[in-house]
Amino acid sequence: MDPQAVLCLVLLWAGGLSCKPMLRKERVRPESELSQRLHDDNGSFLYDHEAFLGKEEAKSFEQLTPEESRGKLGTIVDRIDDDGDGFVSVEELATWIKRVQKRYIFENVVKLWKDYDLNKDNKISWDEYKESTYGYYLANPEEFQDASDQFSFKKMLPRDERRFKTADLDGDHATSRDEFTAFLHPEEFEHMKDIVVLETLEDIDKNEDGFVDQDEYIADMFAHEDGGPEPDWVANEREQFSDFRDLNKDGKMNKEEIRHWILPKDYDHAQAEAKHLVYESDVNKDKKLTRDEILENWRMFVGSQATNYGEDLTRKHTEL
């Protein structure tokens, strides 16, 4: 592969520096709905099924009989009960829902883990990550074809190291699976969100004054060609900047305003759904569910649509 193309892939992977302008909608990371279905228990439980089991996996449950459905659901209940006390609490159910909804993230880490854990000690050190990601270019600096490539490389290496140290919560210079997941997907972890904001600021703040002004905001999503006119959507974005991005109306975005833009606070859908499922299934009204209470109301949880249990039940709990 052409070295410049390889560098582009490295930079995309290593820290979010895109080889093309990143669109605004790719900057914003809102919490997503658990399902696009209408949440109407009088009509169907499709929303609950997709929330509880995941959108993609829910379809394959159509192949199961009611007896198979209950049996598979019982196995899942055992996995949701993290503390093994025989009850499923709202918090345990919300944690499960969040895991299911973000399964692709954990599966991504599982697939990549062996490529970075070079000494097979079930941790990934900074040296291992640096060698796997940047080793070729550190050993072959002549492969850089121009100064811009060298600048990008020099920028990304310390930026990755900074993110790695933030993810390394116990400070042992190596990441566990959870820590490595936070490193690769920082927008999903509260303790990493300052890094997401800082990296966004560094990407857009071309004059390096510590703020994002309107022109920098627009330049991040639209490049003028030959001085031509701006399309209508760009004018709309300028209004968005003035009306909704620049909250203190000083003509630029600071870090808090950038956070408000790219990491908008949202309704906790998983918590709300967990409370709903508990409320609807809690026969004795003790605000937690037994295995029997869940199986009694199995149609709300899985019904005729659920996950590919043949595959799902072979996965380890940590993969969720």
Image (cartoon, helix red, strand yellow):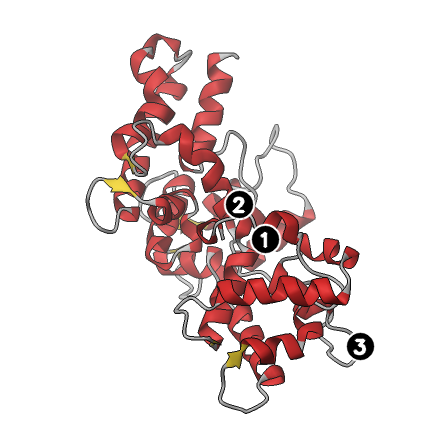
Q: Amino acid at mark 2?
A: Ile
- Determine which residue is flagged by label 2: 218
- Callout 2 secondary element: helix
Q: CA distance from mark 1 to mark 2?
A: 7 Å
Q: Viewed as shown, does residue 284 lie left or right of 186?
A: right
- Callout 3 secondary element: loop
Q: Amino acid at mark 3?
A: Gly
Q: Residues within 10 Å of mark 2 (few under 14, many from 20)?
A: many
Quadrant in which residue 161 is drawn: top left
Place of residue 34 in the rendered image (x, y in percent of width and height, measured from the top left): 61, 63
- Determine which residue is flagged by label 1: 237
Which is nearer the eye, 113 or 267? Answer: 113
- Callout 1 secondary element: helix
Q: CA distance from mark 3 to mark 1?
A: 39 Å
Place of residue 319 in the rendered image (x, y in percent of width and height, measured from the top left): 48, 49
CB-based contact (under 8 Å), mark 1 and mark 2: yes
Q: Amino acid at mark 1?
A: Glu
- Determine which residue is flagged by label 3: 43
Q: Is residue 99 above or below residue 165?
A: below
Place of residue 224 in the rendered image (x, y in percent of width and height, measured from the top left): 59, 34
Which is nearer the eye, 28 or 235? Answer: 28
CB-based contact (under 8 Å), mark 3 and mark 2: no
Count the labels in the image. Answer: 3
Which is nearer the eye, 234 or 160? Answer: 160
Q: Residue at x 54, y 51 (%)?
A: 103
Which residue lies most toward the top here? 142
